[in-house]
Amino acid sequence: MPVEEGHVQPALAAACRAVDDARDEGDLIVKIGNEFRRSDVIGNLFRHHAAMKESSGAAWDRRIDPPGATSVAKWRADAFCNPTLMALLEEAGVGQVRLAGLYAKACVTATAKGARRRGLSVQVIGDATACSSDRSRRAALDKLRRIGIAVV
């Protein structure tokens, strides 16, 4: 699902700054990537077979590939579909997550809600998110604010 071209560079720059800040603070950095299962026939048709597990579409973007980051795969919009994510956060004693990424109205929103359901404090880094359009991103971030998720 393509994002607004004008969101790419600003979101990458903001995400890189957030990673640098997190590293300076000694925070756990987790990169979460789509690895849709081949058995998800309907979903894969909708996504035009993008980001299927072990495909080039699931490869991490080198422009934001923090050294030493822990990698976690997801196969649904909410990254917490992979129980490894919550186990990793619990093991590290994490109580707050800061999210950045693609598809503000889908994956970012679903993961923010999933984190909150699990008792985590959630911040979404607005400048480090992208969506299909400015309007769509703004609507998604506004919705997150309305349901009590911090957008910074």
Image (tube, rainbow, N blue to C red):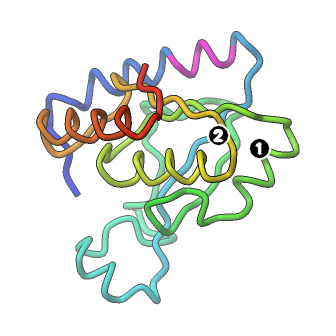
Element marked by disc 2: strand
- Tell me the quadrant of the picture where the N terminus can be found: bottom left
Mark seen at residue 30: 2
Q: Residue at x 20, y 39 (%)?
A: 139
Percent position (x, y) of residue 92?
85, 37
| Residue extent of the magenta highlight | 18-23
In this rendered view, identify the residue nearer to me: 122 or 65. 122
Amino acid type, callout 2: Val
From the image, give the main secondary structure of the stretch colored magenta: helix
Percent position (x, y) of residue 76?
47, 67
Q: Residue at x 51, y 53 (%)?
A: 33
**Above or below, comparing residue 28 to residue 83 in the picture:** above
Element marked by disc 1: helix
Q: Residue at x 30, y 40 (%)?
A: 143
Label 2 close to label 1 by CB (< 8 Å): yes
Q: Crowding at label 1, few (<14), some or many (≥20) Cα neighbours within 10 Å?
A: some
**Above or below, comparing residue 128 to residue 147 in the picture:** above
The mark lying in front, picked from 2 and 1, is 1
**Left or right, residue 111 beside residue 136:** right
Residue position marked by numbered label 1 in the rendering? 89
Q: Residue at x 58, y 42 (%)?
A: 31
